[in-house]
Image: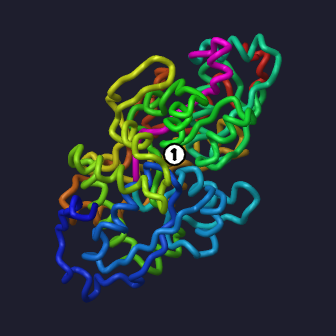
């Protein structure tokens, strides 16, 4: 396996000397058993970090809650993180005291999915509109799982359900389940569907336990997904180590997006027992953008999971951070209107990222980007408060008045 990896290092070992030397040379990195952890796994195991004076020690986590706690206690220096996990910690959501946090870079875009059970499929629920009719008519409440209360998967699931007229806080129940346990919960009948990262949607299809009703990229093409998160204290006390870490992961990210051979080799690597512990034939198709939904459809996705795209993936955009804050506000996680731009500016490490990316010859995009989501709404970060108020369904909506179930 190792001979397939030839890291295109741009720097020699001389980089690690003098004032640029990392303050801490051995870093503990947390990750989850998800295919979008690949850039961290490749960086740590395939000699992408050594030229920057770093040894990266990977520590697989069993849940996002556990990962959050280990970031909080300092057991992890940095970790693959959900956007909402970082901001939740920063704001003190969920009962813990606020802890200043940082997003060093984006790790991935796209590649998540919403999946429904085989039981619903057998009942004729094969798309979102059929699900909305079922919720209105069936009487029994459905239960959907996501991976963390403030996480991306909760926000994708809520956004999609609300677009169908299903109030995610009133018309259905939701539970938190670690990603790797989703299929087991589906099989046991504890949940009727879930939103999670891969390979768990593909695993549900492979085991005949469900089907993919939509991908996250069909909701928002090239949406922000996992990030490299850490405490603000780590950035302030170890700025050279933080920059070196970003550079190493950027090199690995660029390698992953370079060609299909690199991507296939990485799929084989991450399938190993110490990482995802999942068969390669389940991981590789969606990892490379080839989808079968278990509902009779197959396609090559125009917006697949991507790790670099010449840096377009990795910029810690202020607008990406603000979007999640608008959804926190929409669903009552924030009781008052925040200063969206100030909050994002405190968390997103745009200057540190720009320094690292520029040194590797990657373009540094503007900190605000514009996107149009599947429902036609434009998001550009220009007026986040108005955007948060613009949705028909939100935490305070009376579901009956809004026409929901």
> Does residue 116 belong to the magenta stretch?
yes
Q: Residue 39, can we see it? A: yes
Between 233 and 42, which is closer to the camera in this rendering? 42
| x 32%, y 27%: residue | 300
Q: How many marks?
A: 1
Q: Is residue 67 left or right of residue 353?
A: right
Query: x and y percent of residue 17 in the render?
Result: 25, 87
Q: Tell me the quadrant of the picture where the N terminus can be found.
A: bottom left
Residue 101 figure quarter: bottom right
Between 363 and 192, which is closer to the camera in this rendering? 192
- Please say if 212 is above or below 321: above
Give the residue pinned by disc 1. 322
- Please say if 114 is above or below 3: above
| x 39%, y 84%: residue | 23
Between 253 and 279, which is closer to the camera in this rendering? 279
Query: x and y percent of residue 97 in the render?
Result: 71, 66
Are there few (<14), some (14-19), or many (20+) residues within 10 Å of tag 1? many
- Please say if 37 is above or below 218: below
Q: How is the image coloured?
A: rainbow
Residue 290 figure quarter: top left
Secondary structure at badge 1 equals helix
Q: Is residue 103 left or right of residue 165?
A: left
Q: Which residues are magenta?
A: 107-126
Residue at the outermost right position: 139
Q: Residue 390, can we see it? A: no
Q: Tell me the quadrant of the picture where the C terminus can be found.
A: top right
> Does residue 310 belong to the magenta stretch?
no
Query: x and y percent of residue 261 in the render?
Result: 22, 47
Query: x and y percent of residue 315 in the render?
Result: 35, 52
Between 366 and 312, which is closer to the camera in this rendering? 312
């Amino acid at each position: 396996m190792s001979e397939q990896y030839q890291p295109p290092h741009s720097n020699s070992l001389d980089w690690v000397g003098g004032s640029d030397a990392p303050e801490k040379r051995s870093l503990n990195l947390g990750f989850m058993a998800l295919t979008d952890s690949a850039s961290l796994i490749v960086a740590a195991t395939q000699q992408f970090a050594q030229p920057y004076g770093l040894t990266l020690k990977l520590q697989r986590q069993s849940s996002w809650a556990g990962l959050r706690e280990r970031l909080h206690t300092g057991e992890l220096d940095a970790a693959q993180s959900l956007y909402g996990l970082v901001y939740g910690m920063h704001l003190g959501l969920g009962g813990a005291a606020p802890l200043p946090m940082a997003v060093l870079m984006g790790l991935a875009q796209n590649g998540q999915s919403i999946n429904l059970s085989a039981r619903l499929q057998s009942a004729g629920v094969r798309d979102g509109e059929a699900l909305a009719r079922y919720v209105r008519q069936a009487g029994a409440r459905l239960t959907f799982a996501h991976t963390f209360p403030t996480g991306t998967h909760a926000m994708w699931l809520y956004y999609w359900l609300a677009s169908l007229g299903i109030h995610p806080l009133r018309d259905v129940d939701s539970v938190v389940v670690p990603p790797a346990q989703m299929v087991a919960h589906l099989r046991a009948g504890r949940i009727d569907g879930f939103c999670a990262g891969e390979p768990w949607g593909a695993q549900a299809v492979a085991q005949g336990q469900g089907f993919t009703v939509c991908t996250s990229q069909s909701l928002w093409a090239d949406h922000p997904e996992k990030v490299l998160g850490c405490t603000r204290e780590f950035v302030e006390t170890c700025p050279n180590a933080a920059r070196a870490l970003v550079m190493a992961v950027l090199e690995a990210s660029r390698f992953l997006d370079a060609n299909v051979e690199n991507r296939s080799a990485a799929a084989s690597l991450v399938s190993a027992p110490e990482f995802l512990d999942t068969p390669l034939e389940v991981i590789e198709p969606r990892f490379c953008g080839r989808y079968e939904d278990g509902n009779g459809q197959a396609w090559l996705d125009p917006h697949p999971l991507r790790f670099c795209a010449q840096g377009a993936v990795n910029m810690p955009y202020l607008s990406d951070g603000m979007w999640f804050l608008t959804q926190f506000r929409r669903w009552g996680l924030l009781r008052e209107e925040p200063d969206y731009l100030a909050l994002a500016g405190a968390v997103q490490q745009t200057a540190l990222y720009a320094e690292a990316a520029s040194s590797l010859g990657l373009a540094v995009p503007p900190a605000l980007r514009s996107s149009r989501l599947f429902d036609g709404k434009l998001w550009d970060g220009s007026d986040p408060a108005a955007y948060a108020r613009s949705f028909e369904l939100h935490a305070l909506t009376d579901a009956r008045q809004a026409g929901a179930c």
